[in-house]
Image (cartoon, rainbow, N blue to C red):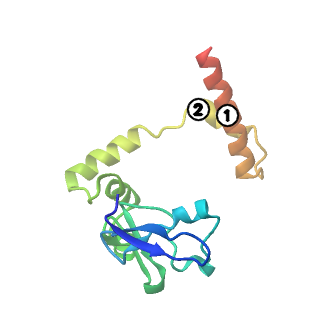
Amino acid sequence: MSDKKATLAVDGKDAIDLPIYSGTIGPDVVDVGALTAQGMFTYDPGFVSTAACESKITYIDGGKGILLHGGYPIDQLAENSDFLETCWLLWNGELPTADEKKAFVANVTNHTMVHDQMNNFFRGFRRDAHPMAIMCVLWEHYQLFITTLST
């Protein structure tokens, strides 16, 4: 819970205390979640001063062109790191050592095989089938499979 508070005074309503949170980087934020209980919403055209979520791994300031993952600028990650290094960073909070990367790549490589029956399943769709339609069918079959296992 936050010790800092902002108080919002609205004509004809009781004052509303709103907690203020400080992030690791960037300006403090005012949690306006309590406004809905008072029958009010915020208005922020373009969401220029609205945070959509709390993140411990990402910082975004679109106005300044800043996008950080794990404290690293995205352009540096794009130039100097590959996908799996970035996955490690987001999972562990720091880039991997050479040995950690080697072990992680081996682990991912050895556990991402697609069973041949799945390949046969995909061949059952037309080549121009929409990917979302395919995913919906896969989801339905997955749910049926789980239901069968639990009975």
> Above or below — where is 85 with respect to 102?
below
x%, y% of residue 150? 59, 17
Residue that label 1 marks: 120
Residue 77's place in the image compared with 91, above or below, is below
Q: Secondary structure at mark 1?
A: helix
* x then y, percent, for residue 48: 54, 80
Q: Residue furthest bottom?
A: 64
Q: Looking at the image, which is closer to me, 29 or 101?
A: 29
At label 1, counting other C-alpha atoms closer than 10 Å, the crowd grade (few under 14, some 14-19, many 20 or more) is few
* SS of the residue under disc 2: helix
* Residue displayed at 59% across by 71% down: 13
Q: Name the residue nearer the viewer: 108 or 21.
A: 21
Q: Amino acid at mark 2?
A: Asp
| Disc 2 crowd, CA 10 A, few/some/many (<14, 14-19, 20+) | few
Does 9 sit left or right of 110 as displayed? right
Disc 1 and disc 2 in contact, CB within 8 angstroms: yes
Q: Which residue is mark 2?
A: 116
Residue ID at (39%, 76%)? 75
Which amino acid does the dot numbered 1 rest on?
Asn
Tell me what residue is drawn at x 70 percent, y 51 percent: 131
For residue 27, the mark is none
Q: How many marks?
A: 2
x%, y% of residue 117? 62, 30
Q: Quadrant of the N terminus?
A: bottom left
Q: Quadrant of residue 4?
A: bottom left
